[in-house]
Amino acid sequence: TLSPRSRPPSTMRGSPAPPPKLVYRTSKDPFVMPKGPEAYSRLKQLCPVYDHELGDKWEDVGPKVRDLLDEQQVRFSTIDLVRFRTVPDQQTPAVISPAVIWIGVLPDTLAGEVALNSANAILALLEGEGIKAVDIEFRESVFRRSAGAELYKPASYLDPTRHVIDPLTTALGLPIVAANTPHLQGTMGFYFKDGDNLYGVTARHVLFPADEDNSDYTYNPSGPRKEVLLMGTKAWKDYLESVQIQIGYHGTAAEIYRESIERLEGKMEGDTPAAAKARRELRKTRELLEETTDAINELQKLYDQTRKDFGKPNQRVIGHVVWSPAITVGTAPHGFTKDVCVVKLDKGRFLPNFKGNVIDLGTEIEAPKFVNKMYPRTDAQPGFKYPADRLLKLKEILADDRMRHPDTKGHDGENCLYVIKRGLTTLTTIGRATGFFSY
């Protein structure tokens, strides 16, 4: 079915807003145009696929789909295996779609005839593999690589700087840039040690711009260093603004507490229940004012100190690149893109407050709600234990079999694998991983 440009796209949870524009699909599920003054498109949820008959064949079939699209000269961005689940309402129950090979194409590049021919070629490929009941769907999509003194230790729950200090701590996910491209920002990945040296791993495209020579790089001690900075121009500006916003927030709260104290002081005299209540509230409000005043002082101190210690770009140099092979696609043995870069870190800035490979789960999702999101079942004990210090340690690599056959279930009873992502802009997000690689 070719999707007319006038067709309102289905709204999908788990996808960016606005949702991706549907271009073409092979689904037998007919599209019904909403009618009436209060009509709306069905709300759909993007879901991962597990335990499908494609199974271990996907790593063979996925590249073949990619090659077919190349033959048809389809300018695609990603190829994924997904399902869709309609969100139930009072009139209609939830409906789960067959597995869908979900293909992202660059906007305004796919003609209807090419979409039809490509979809039929993919269906023929699947039939040759003995695989049926799979839909093909094209949607518009642009793939973008995420390239965005001593560091502090992660802040505790009671630390007034806990909402803003994360970009300056030793936890995973540091925002980094190359010194010569401070506007191109990315993220430091995991840490490792070799002897007494501390290293960090990131993607090559974070520190080597696209217009730079794509050749193997190994640091030559007799040559200049390719320095790596903590926070680029925008990230540093955003950090300073975040501290000022927190100071302003607490300043507003302090003003309200002072007015409340003045009001309560006029009601505390006497032996009436109202007077006793006013005295209790007065004590609590005075405590809150003291805590808020302390928070303002701590945040102002952090603001002044970090501007002094990290304000200039050369004060944010945390290491230099020592090794980065050229970016290659379809790299053996699994056909992945090789995009890696190793940074030797200034251990003197890390080790005093170093906690290892830990993710700070952040403060924006309270612990009970976090556990509920990671394990939403109500008929069993949670399988996820929230760390008391908020620091989730990385312990092992997820086995391929467990990724495809997860041993946990969602609130709807379906097998799923919950995953956590921590980013500078998005902060902590929780979602469900798919069991199949994207191509």
Image (tube, helix red, strand yellow):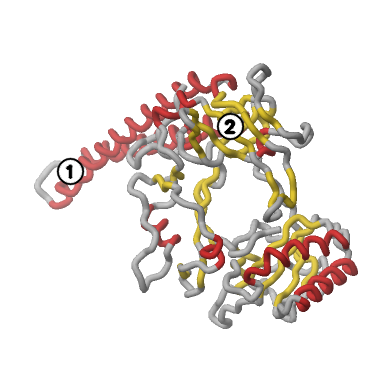
Which image quarter is the N terminus in? bottom right
Which secondary structure lies at badge 1? helix
- Residue 352 placement: quadrant: top left
The amino acid beneath tag 1 is Arg
Query: What label does residue 221 carry, if any?
Result: none
Q: Which residue is found at the position 38% from the left and 63% from the top?
A: 383
Q: Is residue 400 above or below residue 317?
A: below
Asked if residue 309 shows in the view, the reply is: yes
Q: Which residue is found at the position 76% from the left and 34% from the top?
A: 215
Q: Nearer the viewer, residue 264 or 61?
A: 61
Q: Residue furthest top?
A: 222
Disc 1 + disc 2, Cβ < 8 Å: no
Q: Which residue is found at the position 70% from the left and 80% from the top?
A: 133
Q: Which residue is found at the position 40% from the left and 37% from the top?
A: 355
Circle 2 Cα neighbour tier, 10 Å, few/some/many (<14 / 14–19 / ≥20):
many
Query: What label does residue 279 carry, if any?
Result: 1
Circle 1 Cα neighbour tier, 10 Å, few/some/many (<14 / 14–19 / ≥20):
some
- On the image, the x and y values in percent for residue 388 come to 33, 48
Q: Nearer the viewer, residue 81 or 8?
A: 81
The amino acid beneath tag 2 is Val
Frontmost of labels 1 and 2 is 2
- On the image, the x and y values in percent for residue 218 come to 67, 29
- Indicate which disc, 1 or 2, sits on the residue closer to the N terminus: 1
Answer with left or right where residue 153 lies relative to residue 114: left
- On the image, the x and y values in percent for residue 103 come to 74, 63
Q: Which residue is mark 2?
A: 343
Which secondary structure lies at badge 2? strand
Answer with left or right where residue 178 lies relative to residue 31: left
Answer with left or right where residue 178 lies relative to residue 281: right
